[in-house]
Amino acid sequence: MIEVKDLTKRFGATTAVKDLTFTVRPGHVTGFLGPNGAGKSTTLRMILGLSAPSGGSVTVAGRAFGDRRRGLRHVGALLDAGDVHGGRSAAAHLAVLARGNRIPHGRVDEVLAEVGLAGAAGRRRVAGFSLGMRHRLGIATALLGDPPVLLFDEPLNGLDPEGVLWVRGLFRRLAAEGRTVLVSSHLMSEMEHTADELVVIGRGELVAAESLARFAARGTGAGVTVRTPRPADLTDVLTAAGATVSGHGPLLDVTGLDAPRIGDLACRHALPLHELAPRTASLEDAFMELTADSVEYAAGESR
Ligand SMILES: Nc1ncnc2c1ncn2[C@@H]1O[C@H](COP(=O)(O)OP(=O)(O)OP(=O)(O)O)[C@@H](O)[C@H]1O
């Protein structure tokens, strides 16, 4: 479990992260989402103890991560896939880290196999690696200590479709094993099929921390489609109960009441329903609406 409480980080006059409070639970893939410059990387660095908070606290499994020795066995992280000594092979890179964290050497070949870099690829110098191979090596590094908590900063950036599918499957498996998996992205489309929980930030502040489904229901595109042979009567009943109703003929578009409540009200007033279909907003719409005020450099903004 990762617990972030009133976390703040200032860089001179810039407040990159402001009073951020959220919890990341094990057994889920949690998407950490926000527009460019929202403060995601800064927060991840503070979770890892690489950067000191200006205020507030962050704990991993109840303790500040910086306190821990042999860190890779507690938290695995992919922060910057390019951040590897190019002159070394993947296997040599992992072997150095294994030694420093007292991880059995046998894990090196295990994680190389897991990320598809077994054999010759693992013996090649990292300088010649493609972006996708660097990503795989970064993920192998995160997995090396078999940690219960994993953090990935923009892990899908620059991956081809096959790589994206592979990474998604891996994250789901890690979460199903009961691990805590936090994955950052600035694209809702990437998280839609990757995460089941979301922490959304904008300009360093919390926008939402909830399941993907609840987040989608916040978008104004959410509502319920209702078909009835008595639209005028049903409109009166639903409007009196606080809903907003629009539509033509037998097909109504209802917002402000959920489908079970609409069904119950129709039943109570003996109004037949021929269709009752909840409609979620697209996640992308909800994300854009909720972070609209917090985009650092919005298109068309004059500066
Ligand atoms: N070392 C630093 N010194 C000064 N300002 C910084 C530093 N690191 C980050 N910032 C500023 O803090 C804010 C948050 O940056 P951060 O990199 O955490 O955002 P992000 O959400 O990860 O963005 P992106 O999606 O673009 O990677 C930005 O305004 C950035 O310019």
Image: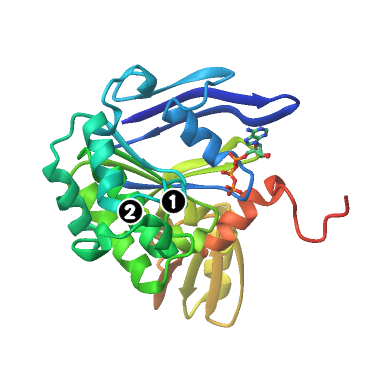
**CA distance for labels 1 and 2:** 8 Å
Q: Residue at x 39, y 78 (%)?
A: 274
Sequence-first disc among 1 and 2: 1
Q: Along the line of sight, which residue is nearer the eye, 171 or 120?
A: 120
Q: Name the side, left or right, on which 124 lies relative to 280.
A: left
Residue 237, given in percent of the width and then of the height, sits at 53, 61
Q: Quadrant of the rendered structure where residue 24 is?
A: top left
Q: Along the line of sight, which residue is nearer the eye, 265 or 50?
A: 50
Q: Residue at x 61, y 42 (%)?
A: 38
Residue 52 shows in this picture? yes
Q: Name the side, left or right, on which 226 lies relative to 146.
A: right
Residue 163, given in percent of the width and then of the height, sits at 35, 67
Residue 85, given in percent of the width and then of the height, sits at 41, 46
**Element type where label 2 sits in the image:** helix
Amino acid type of the residue that numbered disc 2 sits on in the rendered structure: Leu
**Element type where label 1 sits in the image:** loop
> Ligand 1: does it lie within 8 Å of the C-beta at label 2?
no
Q: Residue at x 18, y 58 (%)?
A: 113
> Ligand 1: does it lie within 8 Å of the C-beta at label 1?
no
Question: Do the CB atoms of the residues marked 1 and 2 lie less than 8 Å apart?
Answer: yes
Residue 297, given in percent of the width and then of the height, sits at 75, 51
Amino acid type of the residue that numbered disc 1 sits on in the rendered structure: Ala
Q: Along the line of sight, which residue is nearer the eye, 237 or 128?
A: 128
Q: From the viewer's perspective, is residue 26 above or below residue 89?
A: above
Residue density around tag 2, few if under 14, some if 14–19, many if 20 or more, within 10 Å: many
Q: Which residue is mark 2?
A: 137
Ligand 1 rendered quadrant: top right
Q: Along the line of sight, which residue is nearer the eye, 16 or 75?
A: 75
From the image, which quarter does the N terminus lie in?
top left
Q: Name the side, left or right, on which 177 lies relative to 10.
A: left
Q: Which residue is mark 1?
A: 81
Q: From the viewer's perspective, is residue 145 above or below residue 286?
A: above
